[in-house]
Amino acid sequence: MSAAPLLSVRDLSVSFATEGGRLPAVERVSFDLSPGEVLAIVGESGAGKSVTAQTIIGLTRSPNARIEGRVELRGTDLVAAGEGELRTVRGERIGMVFQDPMTSFNPVHRIGSQIVEAIRAHRSIGKQEARGLAVEMLDSVGIAEAARRVDDYPHEFSGGMRQRAMIAMALALEPEVLIADEPTTALDVTVQAQILGLLERLNRERGLATILITHDLGVVAEIADRVLVMYGGRVVEQGTLEQIFYDPQHPYTWGLLGSLTRLDRPRPERLPQIAGAPPSLLALPEGCSFRPRCPHEFAPCTELPPLQARLTGEPGHCDRCWLTPEAKREKRQVAGQIGLEAPSP
Amino acid sequence: MSGPNLLEVTDLVKHFPIKSGVLIDREVDQVRAVDGISFSVERGKTLGLVGESGSGKSTACRAILNLTKPTSGSVKFEGQEIAGLSRRQMRPLRREMQMIFQDPYASLNPRKRIGQIVGDPLKRQGVASGSELRRRVEELLDRVGLATEHYDRYPHEFSGGQRQRIGIARALALQPKLVIADEPVSALDVSIQAQIINLLDDLQDEFGLTYVFVAHDIGVVRHISDRIAVMHDGKIVEEGTADQVCEHPRDDYTKKLLTAVPIPDPREAQARRAAPA
């Protein structure tokens, strides 16, 4: 791994003023991203995944938002950057793909002209040249007959094609970082597999660094190098793909892994579930936010555990749980597999 | 009374006309949304109907319940033909068959209180009123894991998972025999999905319900179903027990669907990627 990361997020906190009080959407999140790396951020709705990603490119800036911490892209702090500088960063250096490809394109303009406009907003090149680039990009993301389809309207594309076109637009200016927020959630599984294959190829061929936001651990297992698990606005566990899947340290991660329906295993009588619901950010419990849903709660949990490495020899594998590594190894075994045991009635 | 099957669907067809013309509409073609499907569901069992968007699974549900008039074919409920019955004729049968919808945000009237939403079917069918109605609604709320204090709240005060519980309580109010659930968990967070699937499982055991469970996620369908039918382009391409279909698929499309599902295990996922397709 190279010494200086491409993107470095340090103690990023984002809160919003609401009628119900100050809402802490993201609390002191830190991570590094290296060229060619895929970092997955997983968690449920309200965990702070999207706010984290949007804040990186300055999309959460508003009079109601308070943003603290640093986001450094090759040494430039994006939190402190001016709007003009951010506009250059968005698109040219960081591309973004959203969940719903139908609402991300303007329905009354042709796909090609929207890509051309995005390119020409950043590069002083002629329309014809930009159009050639748009065709080339559509072709490279696997749109058949790109030279003809470039003049289609968004509704003439299928969901999968629209998402490919979104990726083509995000990558047209050759950014170093791609932020993909639930890029395959709205797609059929067969199309999802194609899009994941495409993202993987772009990573390998272009050394593109990717932040992938998803709630689907199956998608994570297919494509990620490292994983950040978020809960209630905080990172509760982070580590490599192998560490998170085979040696998970936080009970919430156990619960996520345990509640998956898996085609590669015999089906269990009952699907392991996580009790309760994600917390309201306006009324986070004192101490560990997962405490009310955790069957392993004990006295120390009323104090928030720091995010730190608790396993010897694995400095990159951090979690927020007071249990000892030995206790965790024992407690996470449910019916011979990793899971969260049912709460005692 | 009518054999072990609660529901028998035979050669069910639903085509939508594509019209063209200026003054007089001419039918120029048809969308074959459901193109001759047949299956049956045993009492107390679950049939999973799986397929991708546009495969015709939602139209099939609507045609089975006579919410959209089938073009042709037969739907027998407890041995009685219901395809083509009028709204009036369907009315007494509506109690017996209910539906749970995908989007818990769109399927509950935002201006009604929870008690009203869940109690409406009971009132409309003249089953209960007054304090008896309230008692029954509270019982239902309790059964699906909501609190009786929720009776006077509005839908927006609930999370997606809780709203789906409200939808389930409403569907169960009239003690139906058949419940058709159209993508009931696909809009929910993973940890909540498991809760709702387990709840549906428990309710089936308790009330002897028969389910048609429609979803695009074959992992979820396999977990809850006794038998699975795979739909593609309006047709059922394969049907069998859940384990047969998932472990020994015969149809090419079923195989494609199964291999496209990501394996939440990095080593196995890598092994599969490395293996020649």
Image: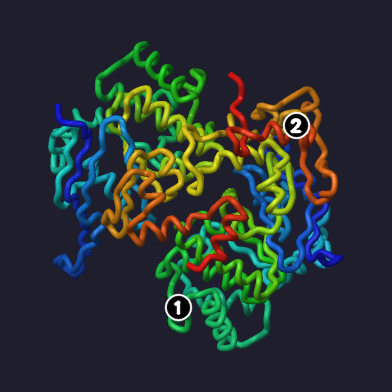
Circle 2: residue type: Ala
* Residue placed under numbered mark 1 in the picture: A144
Where in the figure is residue B235, as x and y percent of width and height?
Answer: 26, 56
Horizontal side of B131 relative to A60 (left or right) equals left
Does any portion of residue B163 appear in the rendered image?
A: no
Circle 2 SS class? helix
Horizontal side of B233 relative to A9 (left or right) equals left
Please tell me which of labels 2 and 1 falls first in the chain.
Answer: 1
Residue furthest to the top in view is B131
The quadrant where residue B74 appears: top left
Does any portion of residue B152 appear in the rendered image?
A: yes
Circle 1 SS class? loop
Dot 2 and dot 1 within a common chain: yes
Horizontal side of B97 relative to A134 (left or right) equals left
Q: Residues within 10 Å of mark 1 (few under 14, many from 20)?
A: few
The quarter of the image holding the N terminus of chain A is bottom right
Circle 1: residue type: Ala
Q: Chain of mark 2?
A: A
* Residue placed under numbered mark 2 in the picture: A327
Q: Chain of mark 1?
A: A
Q: Is residue A109 above or below residue B67?
A: below
Residue drawn at x 78%, y 26% as measured from the top left? A302
